[in-house]
Image: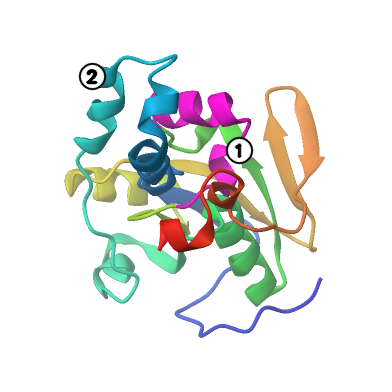
Amino acid sequence: MRRIERESRGEMRPGQDLVVAGYAGLAGTRKIIEKKEEELRTRYAKSYLEDVKCVPEKELDPEDPVWKSLGATEWEAAGEGGIHQALWNLSGAYQKGFEIDLHQIPVRQETIEVCEFYDLSPYDLLCGNCMVFVADNGAHLVKELEKLDIPARTIGVVQKGIKREICYGQVRGFMDRPKKDEIYEIIDEEAVL
């Protein structure tokens, strides 16, 4: 595992929980709908697509010191490259592996539908106001985030060694090195910015 250079905010050690706050791929979903609405309307009602624009989101600032007071020991904002990129960065920075359950990552049904339409992964899609946290007690951190109206779930645990293991139902595998954000499969880079 190649070390990823980034500023440390705290610690990440085996046995700690991994928590995702916010929705995976929501920013990318909104951008795709904005740019490809006519095409998407061949399958989905306009009202269904417009509902995504109204999903409330709290701003999650990675520089906000409140995260430590809620129980987080480390965190990474999920942005370009999605949840997978954020997990990869945390794991690489601390040279620690993890085991996660993809079913536990918060993702909106609209994101799943848009990703299925274009054969994309919601976990590799542009995120906004979404973060991956490391905590000694993931359930406690989830409750504290939910008190702030931030959707959150415990998705896995930090492991000894460097394996980045992903579970999806009965299927287990390992995370591949993140590639370019999935949004660029549909929208050119200039249109995203």
User: Residue 156: in sight, yes or no?
Assistant: no
Q: Position of residue 170 (x, y in %)?
A: 75, 22
Pick out the residue farthest to the front. 38
Badge 2 density bin: few <14, some 14–19, many ≥20, Cα 10 Å: few
- For the residue labelled by badge 1, is the local secondary structure a helix, a strand or a loop? loop
Query: In this view of the protein, which residue sits in the foreground, 4 or 74?
Result: 4
State yes or no: discs 1 and 2 in contact (Cβ < 8 Å). Answer: no
Reply yes or no: does residue 93 show up in magenta.
no
The secondary structure making up most of the magenta span is: helix
Of circles 1 and 2, which is in front?
2
Q: Position of residue 156 (x, y in %)?
A: 58, 45
Q: Position of residue 101 (x, y in %)?
A: 61, 36
User: Residue 64: in sight, yes or no?
Assistant: yes
Name the residue beneath numbered marker 1. Answer: 121
> In the rendered structure, which segment of residues is drawn in magenta?
108-126
Tell me which residue sits at (24%, 37%) in the image: 53
Query: In this view of the protein, which residue sits in the foreground, 174 or 66?
Result: 174
Reply yes or no: does residue 124 show up in magenta.
yes
Tell me which residue sits at (47%, 66%) in the image: 76
- In the picture, the disc for residue 47 is 2
Q: Quadrant of the N terminus?
A: bottom right
Figure quadrant of residue 161: bottom right
As drawn, is 149 to the left or to the right of 18?
Answer: left
Scheme of image coloration: rainbow
Q: CA distance from mark 1 to mark 2?
A: 23 Å
Q: In the figure, 132 relative to 116: above or below?
A: below
As drawn, is 159 to the left or to the right of 9?
Answer: right
| Amino acid bearing label 1 | Ser
| Amino acid bearing label 2 | Ser
Q: Earlier in the sequence, mark 1 or mark 2?
A: 2
Query: In this view of the protein, which residue sits in the foreground, 146 or 26?
Result: 26
